Image (cartoon, rainbow, N blue to C red):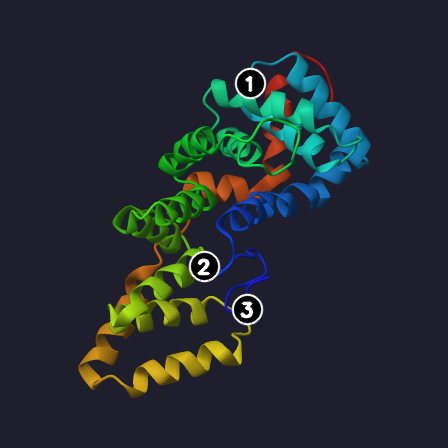
Amino acid sequence: MRRLIPARRHATLRQPLRAALLTLCFAGFAAAATLPAQAQAAGGSHAALFARVEAAASRSDSPALKYHLGMLLNNGIGSARDLPRAYALFSEAAAAGDALAAYKVGCYLAGQFAGVVPLDEAQALAYKQRAAEAGYDLAQHDVGLVLLKRGDRAGAERWLALASRQGDLASTRALAVLAEKDGKDPVQALGLLLVAQAGMRPAPAALADRIATLKSGMDDAGRQRAEALQAGWVTGPTALTQQARAGMRDVEPLLTAARPTGQQP
């Protein structure tokens, strides 16, 4: 994983873009795979929880339930991994308006699992952009990298900034690299690296060294502007990003809503 960001992200701007995007598509795995105590208590086991979600999804039109069932099949939790079925569920949920499912469809189309669906980079971007526009930080990061590859630096910086302001440190570092490139904006680069440093526990020594180098070449006014940028940069995750990070923790209310009247859990 990246050296200047936490373990949730892998890619750097120096790695091939497609590999970076594929890695990011796996970021939702941890939230889905780490089932919370309340889900374990309610379902008794991964297999029992899978059965409950599958049954609820079969009797409900909820796109969110289809998305969660897709994630369980995508990750092989409570059942054997079934990627074609997972993709079909993501597609159904995305067609019904679920933004996180749209992101997963985009990941498959970008080549996350070779051979499940044909590679289609244009459609992958379109699906991911739906999720990005809905506020999902991973999707915003992915869209930013694709636009950067296409030479749309302004568009890339816009999407990366939206993700960075949610606390996405991969996007923060990417923006810092762009700001520092060719001496474009060392004040912004310093401010963004300070944001990254504040979000990492512990921060790597290489990051501290880079911050010290930037500070040494800057006057007091520049350092103060960088610190002001850091102080007001992160505004917090959107509701959709919080939902994605919650993973299976949000499934119980969906199961309750899908339960026939009078039926006990």
Asked whether residue 60 is in view, the answer is yes
* In the depicted structure, whether residue 99 falls above or below residue 137: above
Instruction: Point out residue 239 in the picture as x, y percentages from the top left corner.
Output: 43, 40
Q: Is label 3 in a helix, a strand or a loop?
A: loop
Asked whether residue 259 is in view, the answer is no
Q: Residue at x 64, y 24 (%)?
A: 255
Circles 2 and 3, Cβ within 8 Å, touching? The answer is no
The residue where tag 2 is placed is 13
Q: Give the label on residue 7, or none.
A: none
Please identify, in this view, whether the residue under mark 1 or under mark 2 is nearer the observer.
2
Q: Is label 1 in a helix, a strand or a loop?
A: helix
Left or right of 105? Residue 209 is left
Residue type of the residue flagged with mark 1: Glu
Res. 8 image quadrant: bottom right
Q: Give the label on residue 92, or none.
A: 1
Mark 1 or 2 closer to N-term? Answer: 2
Residue type of the residue flagged with mark 2: Leu
Left or right of 127? Residue 265 is right
Please identify, in this view, whether the residue under mark 3 or under mark 1 is nearer the observer.
3
